[in-house]
Image: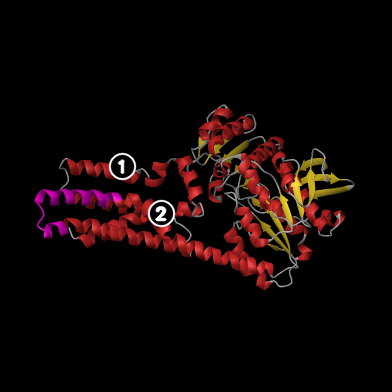
Amino acid sequence: MNPLFLAFLTTAASLSPLITFASLWQIKEWRIDRLREHLRSEGILRQLFGVTRPAFLGFFGFLGFFGFLSRDLWPITTLAVYIAISALQIILHRHPKPVWTKKALTLIGTAILLTFVTSFYNCQLPVLLALSSIEVSVIEGSTVNCQLSTVIIPLLQPFFLFMAWILWSPLDKYLKARIMYRAQQLRASRSNLTVIGITGSVGKSTTKELLTHVLADKQPLTTPDHVNTEMGVSKWIISTLPKNPDSQIMIVEMGAYQAGEIAILCSITQPTIGVVTFIGTQHIALFGSQEALCQAKGELVASLPDDGNAFLNMDSSLCSGLKEMCECHITTVGTGGVSDIEAFDIEETSHGITFRISDTTFSVPLHGTHNVTNVLLAIAVAEKLGMNRSEISEKLKSYRPAQHTFSVREENEVTILDDTHNSSQASFKAAITWAKSQPAKHKILLTSGLIELGEVQDRTHTELGTLSAGIFDRVVFTHKKSARSFARGYGQDVEIFTKHVEKIESDSLLVCVGRMSQTTIKLLLPQTKTSQPSN
């Protein structure tokens, strides 16, 4: 067999598993820690190698070993089946694919090159041994090893991609450092800029959008959706600040998966106002402990200057514990205890939430009473920046929640609570509580479950199942991983989503929690023509 042809065939058979794994790693932001936790949670062997290709490898290997296929034919047959599987996935539109960024193209391209070189050398070895007059038995053994290696190489694409990541890592770190330094210098050149940093396990995006809406007349610069890491924020600053020389306020959402990352964000953005929304268990598996997670979120308030201001949610006991890390003025908000700004007479209506602060009433078209503290934080910061409560109250009446963030809409005669932007234990519980208060006759929960919870993964889903018992008529999981734990608390079996899932009835309530596509939601809806937003 021509070594060059076999190397090309092996590389072609490797493209699909390579691209599949690259799309997964890209979702985890090319981070080793997030990828490791995903593999631990979902199963290392299945996630790295899949099921179908190893099964065919075993089948054709068996045929080749017992002589049903010739020694030269079985590896070619196996590679051809690999390619056929990939083609079928593409035809059926079931093949994962990454976003083709420069980084994705570079890493995938490098992995392909490594695969081809390895395959060619592997196939060339028996030929080189033959030319060197080596004993026939040695050559035959080398040929067998070559054949086995050839069909295994496509299954090893996660390792080739990892090698590409390692090779490019030094340059990647250097380029990131340059970008962050440039962003830091741009921010430092704007001494008149008030930077508001917002962090927390849940509620960051909602608080950011609320504050942006209230401060609209001041034309604040606000980080876009899903931009909350040091690199994302740095690139945004570089592209945004030079175009807005007169802007006085910048609102920055700050996320983290490890200790020290919010501190880096703060060194770049230099916030003078810090907001901590809520601290729960989101991503606790990456931090290792609740204490480490709290310390990480506290890096924001610890970075504030002496003349800065920290805003803390007293309804979150872990959040209130950050007071010791503050060396600046602290403003607290809450709904059930002593705080500087406290909400009373909280009520959930068909249009959103209403509450009172002293003698001022606020009506906000935002569902879920858990969002009251997010509104309070926005009010508190706006007051700090010179707005009065009546003015803020009027502004909040016209607020419209971001799509897929605890938003409610009517579609196909079904009321849908869409909380698919992101999810945490706290927001999941809030969705259950909200659903309980609704008058719908039929209530259905559609969820992907929660991720990156580490050792508390099963216990958390069992608790959520217990809370859901007696509220939802049906529970549908888009992934099997945590369905069993949820069912244990729910007291009965839950469904696993398929394209043939039974549709729900009209006039039902559908609660959607966790990452999922809108196509998944639509597959559950009844076939009607009605579709209109509720707010």
Kind of residue indicated by mark 1: Ala
Q: Nearer the viewer, residue 230 or 48?
A: 230
Q: How many marks?
A: 2
Q: Callout 1: few (<14), some (14-19), or many (20+) C-alpha neighbours within 10 Å?
A: few
Tell me if I can see residue 357 in this picture: yes
Residue located at (34% from left, 50% from top): 156
Residue with the mark numbered 2:
162
Which sits in the foreground, 384 or 459?
A: 384
Whether residue 429 sits left or right of residue 139 in the image: it is right
- Locate the N terminus and report the quarter of the image it occupies: bottom left
Q: Say which amino acid is labelled 2.
A: Phe
Q: Residues within 10 Å of mark 2 (few under 14, many from 20)?
A: some
**At x 52% / y 35%, what residue is drawn?**
483
SS category of the residue bearing label 1: helix
In the image, taking residue 320 as reference, residue 14 lies left or right, namely left
Q: Which mark is residue 335?
A: none
Is 506 situated left or right of 83 in this image? right
Residue 474 place in picture, x, y as percent: 58, 34
- As for residue 195 lying within the magenta part, the answer is no
Tell me where residue 456 appears, x and y as whole percent.
Answer: 56, 35
Q: Which mark is residue 55?
A: 1
Residue drawn at 18 percent across, 48 percent down:
144
- Identify the mark nearer the N-term, 2 or 1: 1
